[in-house]
Amino acid sequence: MSVAAPINITVVTDKAKVSPVNAKERPFPLEWTRNIGIAAHIDAGKTTTTERILFYSGAVHKMGEVHEGTTVTDWMEQERERGITITAAAISCAWNASWGPWKGIKQRINIIDTPGHVDFTAEVERSLRVLDGAVAVFCAVAGVQPQSETVWRQANKYRVPRVAFINKMDRVGANFYRAVDEMREKLKANAHPIFLPIGAEENFSGLIDLVQNVAYSFEEDPADQLGMNPKTMPIPADMVAKTKEYRDKLIEAVSDFDDVIAEKYLGGEEISVADLMLGVRKATISLQFTGVIPGSAFKKKGVQRLLDCVVNYLPSPIDVPPMQGQDSDGKTVEAVVDDKAKMAGLAFKLWNDPFVGRLVFFRVYTGQLKRGMSLYNPRTRRSERVSRLVLMRAIEREEIDLAYAGDICAVVGVKDVITGDTLCDEDFDIRLEPPSFPEPVISMSIEPNSKADQEKMGNALQRLVAEDPTLKVKTDQDTGQTILAGMGELHLDIIRDRMKREFKVEATAGKPQIAYRETIKTSADGEGKFIRQSGGKGQYGHVCIKLEPNAKGKGVEVINETVGGSIPKEFIKPATEGLLEGANNGVVAGFPVVDVIMRIVDGSFHEVDSSELAFKMAGIFAFKDAMKQANPILLEPIMGVEVTTPEEYQGDLMGDINRRRGQIQGMENKAGACIIAAHVPLETLFGYVTDIRSLSKGRASASITPSHFEQVPNSLLAKIVETSSKAPART
């Protein structure tokens, strides 16, 4: 493993010595602030963990439960009914670490609880974009699940340091060490325990802190039924050897990131608790190391230790590299964290609140955001005025006058803002990099039930699309239907439910349509001519292209290879636009074309009659001509399906996957359950979760994630072409 570049971390424990970038009146200095997200696979226990964090930090006075629908961060009716998280909720709390350099110093922790379901992956994407650190929650029984991998990749993409919380240690089949091994194998994470569990399943009774070399007991105490004060105790005799083994492994892993520890380790010297804590912090912030903590959020075990780890090991806004953006000339500009600098921040989420109207969730990267301030939006080149500033506590709001660098707040009053917009001072030329979102994989038609609903539906969809970047709405040119496209059946189901409840729109949904794609298997030449003579000035455009297959996932590329001015420079752009427009509707069934290279090789023009429109039309014709000869094929989305089932239903469920044209990729037995991994075409998966529940008497569960595209079998091609409303006209 390569040694990472040295990371300098200053540990400030005296308010008089905090960095000069802090404003004097700031309640929590930057060094004492943590912006973290809780992210994981569905049902790993994120919301319960968040709920316990809020309780132990004093932000709420009663613990809510997901199964009772009483949690703070799952506040939408749909979330409480279904027991899942749909929208990322932001909330703040303060924590006094029980040990370490910040012991006794209150730290502000801003938390975003994110959804685990793949249909709401955009919520995770945009949250991780603005966070400095994350807690990845894993289930001690199931280990690393498919959506855990997706979340991990998203955190890697945005370079978010994280600690891992292995939850549900009290469950039958819980295995902490197996979960750590899976993190290394499946996530390629440099994962090392920083705590060891004492016992497991119903005997899970404590933790051993490898950094401090002490143990914590969770024995039930009648005087402390909520577990507010876990007792420290000596390390149990039967765990001493294991503790030494894992502490040595931890020191060895951390020595790659800290010269002081490396020298002492090689010299055989004793490493102090303070040195090791700082070493783990440096290693975590380098992104090359993940500390792992066992616990059980539901049984209130280990959550305070997790909060200590958030403070001691995850970065403050000062510890992470400055956010990068571009100025109007495309040069890189940095938003360095500083309360006294010019203001810049990122709008990462929009929400329509029934009481205050549109809320824009905002991360301030530098400068101070004041109520009544005028902000510049580089995308629209307009100024927006902030009428109110609020601090979010899930659905509740607290009015504030001022937000500082590193804060996460919500802005009221800005009108023309979309997810990913930068808002900044007018004389600070910067556009911060917005989060990126996956393309929708499934669509359905939606029809209002009455004329009155028609207008309301347009309004509702406009607001829902502004909130959710993975929701797309378009009108089908051929049928006039309104088509909704999203990330999955559940996603579209929730959107319909919200239209009914929040916007009082009654609408009927058609069968979901699948986002097929088209591509080619061979190269071909194509020619397009657009010639019209109708007296007076005519139209003349002529384009010759070579169409070639592109590498998978590369998309559509247009390359100009004309020589000698066969097509004048001013007509290359319209010809390119024509080619790209042609690629929006393929020749097999009218679906968008992917992964092709179009080379404009030749053409001709007329001194008088050539125009931009003529060359655009010639480009469309040239593309269609080449595509027909290039062995075009239809591609269908294939989903990665992971089914967890008791072993007695394994045969039935595998047979069901085969009937759906699925390919089984592997099987694994874990704690009495069988896990089947398969690739299955999306077309066969409608209602799948309901079907497997009936096959297994409700005991199997499945997670479905987009995987890749594959060629549609010829036996199904004719049926798809016939039923496609987008099929090309018979010419």
Image (cartoon, helix red, strand yellow):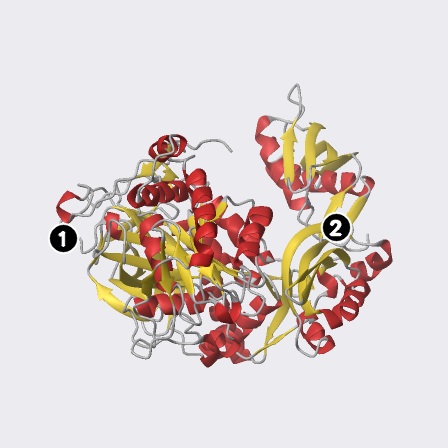
* Dot placed on the residue nearer the N-terminal end, 1 or 2: 1
Check disc 1: other Cα within 10 Å, few if <14, some if 14-19, many if 20+.
few
Mark 1 touching mark 2, by CB under 8 A? no
Left or right side of 692 for 394: left
Q: Amino acid at mark 1?
A: Glu
Q: Residue furthest right?
A: 715
Q: Residue at x 69, y 46 (%)?
A: 593
Q: Residue at x 44, y 38 (%)?
A: 252
Q: Nearer the viewer, residue 181 or 494?
A: 181
Q: What numbered label is drawn on residue 669?
A: none
- Residue bearing the label numbered 1: 25
Q: Residue furthest top?
A: 564
Kind of element beneath mark 1: loop
**Count of numbered labels shown in the rendering:** 2
Residue 352 visible in the picture: no
Q: Nearer the viewer, residue 137 or 627?
A: 137
- Residue bearing the label numbered 2: 710
Q: Amino acid at mark 2?
A: Glu
Q: Nearer the viewer, residue 565 or 506?
A: 506
Measuring from the top left, give residue 678's x and y in whole percent. Answer: 72, 58
Q: Residue at x 44, y 71 (%)?
A: 298
Q: Residue at x 29, y 78 (%)?
A: 223
Q: Quadrant of residue 539?
A: top right
Residue 689 visible in the picture: yes
Q: Quadrant of residue 104?
A: bottom left
Measuring from the top left, give residue 176's x and y in whole percent. Answer: 52, 58
Left or right side of 691 for 140: left
